[in-house]
Amino acid sequence: MNPDFIIIGSGIAGLNLALSAAKKGKVLIITKKRAVESNTNRAQGGIAAVLAKTDDFKKHVKDTMTAGSYHNNKKAVEYMVERGPKVIQNLIDLGLEFTTSGGVIDLGQEGGHSHRRIAHVGDFTGQEIEKILVQKVKENSKITVWENTFALELIVKNKICNGVQIIKKGKIENIYASAVIIATGSIGQLYRYTTNSKISTGDGIAMAMRAGCKTKDLEFIQFHPTVLDKNINPKFLLSEALRGEGAVLRNSKGEIFMKSIHPQAGLAPRDIVSRAIWKELEKGPVYLDITGENSEMVRTRFPNIYKTLLKYKYDLTKDRVPISPAVHYSCGGIKVDLHGQTCIKNLFATGEVTHTGVHGANRLASNSLLEALVFSEEITDKLKKRKGKSEAFAKPSITEEKGAQIRKRIRELMWKYAGVIRTKKGLVKLQKELGKLEKLFPSSSKTNITLAETKNMLTVAKKITSSALKRDKSLGCHFITN
Ligand code: FAD
Ligand code: SIN
């Protein structure tokens, strides 16, 4: 295989980019599990875009900036919001059938939005997007997909990226290309409780850091306020769209406590709702309650959530469901410009792994799929084929050792000290404990996928901690008390 462009990751960002990059050359997508295994596949609520006649770009920009505590890059926000309707149309052209009502796209409501603007496919939007994109990619003769292939290291020399070192079928190989694009998604598995797929171990950020890339705003880890309170990994999400259709949050006394906390009550931005739930949980369980709404509407609008909850013995139309917040999204990431360019030549990044500046200190609901669609396409203009790209690159060998214990410890420590509410003392302790874990890794140059992922988790955990320690005042998702 002699690709022109290598894309690491087969979520919405990697797949969407592959379709446009294939117009310029041969594309190889490498992905560490099956192609559909991604956070994209788990997305429920939908994609935010200005589609209603009564809505406008300025309102979407303002909502995004308000949710982000005005820490956002306004130019990037405007760039993304203005391209929203176009990327929705592109998905429709690819064959995606959004849920409609009266012949037009049905628009959902989510936290922090001043207007109904969430295009969705029932409550399984991500699964449908992933299905269509994977199908289109597999039909394209210019694109090859290598599943169960792990990106271990970027091949970088003199600040130029020449390819990727991979683990495929238990062997380490070097693959060279004119450009490499990181689309590896999130970091959720660094924490004990998360909505994120098990693929979310921060590999892209760690690899990019080792190669010399800059990261930004990694302290802003977003918690989703409402996941089913069951000890499962990943946690099952109860979409914010439920609150958009009338669900309320009740404390152990049955009170709708958000009413006294924010004018938008349960539909306030996520950081505010998560903190309020966190405090209520100290007193007793918290519930999501949609029993006041029409049962037929609940079953047809939320078929996936309804069916899944039945397995856990909750009937959404009759029962209050116990919830808690869990780690959901990384607002920061690899620093890129609006065309996905990192500070290394021929190395780009796209999707959740990046920091484009659109989310500020707390992402607005359903802006993530939008960001991935808008900015992934922008990279294509910058892709160029070139000659003489191969370089000798040392290959480590494979070991049997596993990092399971270290991984468990990282997840516990991050949950305890870098969570919804942080203290300086806790973060200092976290930094020390993570430092101790580093010494437990085998010192040889041998590796394997679990070990490599665990090392990546530790690298990113340390970076989140040091970024959080540098920010001594609370902002958005980073909330620090004494
Ligand atoms: P992903 O979709 O996570 O894809 C990452 C890819 O990289 C995967 O294929 C993975 O296998 C691969 N990969 C990772 N590391 C390696 C490696 N070392 N080697 C090879 N491959 C690798 N956002 C919204 O806007 N609206 C929603 O409704 C919504 N709902 C959500 C619900 C849930 C439960 C979750 C978890 C997230 C939700 N989000 C939502 C967020 C959104 O889904 C993600 O931010 C987005 O899908 C990220 O896309 P991505 O392509 O960047 O990464
Ligand atoms: C949800 O459906 O609540 C998730 C939406 C998002 O993460 O933007």
Image (cartoon, grey):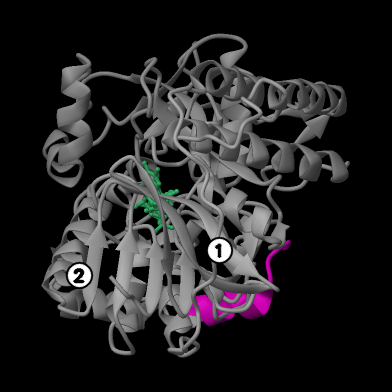
The residue closer to the viewer here, 10 or 193, is 10
Image quarter for residue 15? bottom left
Question: Over which residues does the magenta segment extend?
Answer: 70-81
The residue at the point 33 percent across, 30 percent down is 236
Give the SS element for disc 2: helix
- Prevailing SS of the magenta stretch: helix
Query: Looking at the picture, which amino acid does disc 2 mark?
Result: Val
Left or right, 239 with respect to 60, comes to left
Residue 155's label in the rendered image is 1
The residues tagged by marks 1 and 2 sit, at their Cα atoms, a distance apart of 25 Å
Left or right, 474 with respect to 255, comes to right
The residue at the point 69 percent across, 22 percent down is 437
CB at mark 2 closer than 8 A to ligand 1? Answer: no
Question: From the image, which quarter does the C terminus lie in?
Answer: top right
Can the viewer see residue 89?
A: yes
Q: Which residue is mark 2?
A: 137
Image quarter for residue 312? top left
x then y, percent, for residue 41: 28, 49
| Residue 255 vertical placement versus 109 (above, below) | above
The residue closer to the viewer here, 107 or 15, is 15
Question: From the image, which quarter does the N terminus lie in?
Answer: bottom left
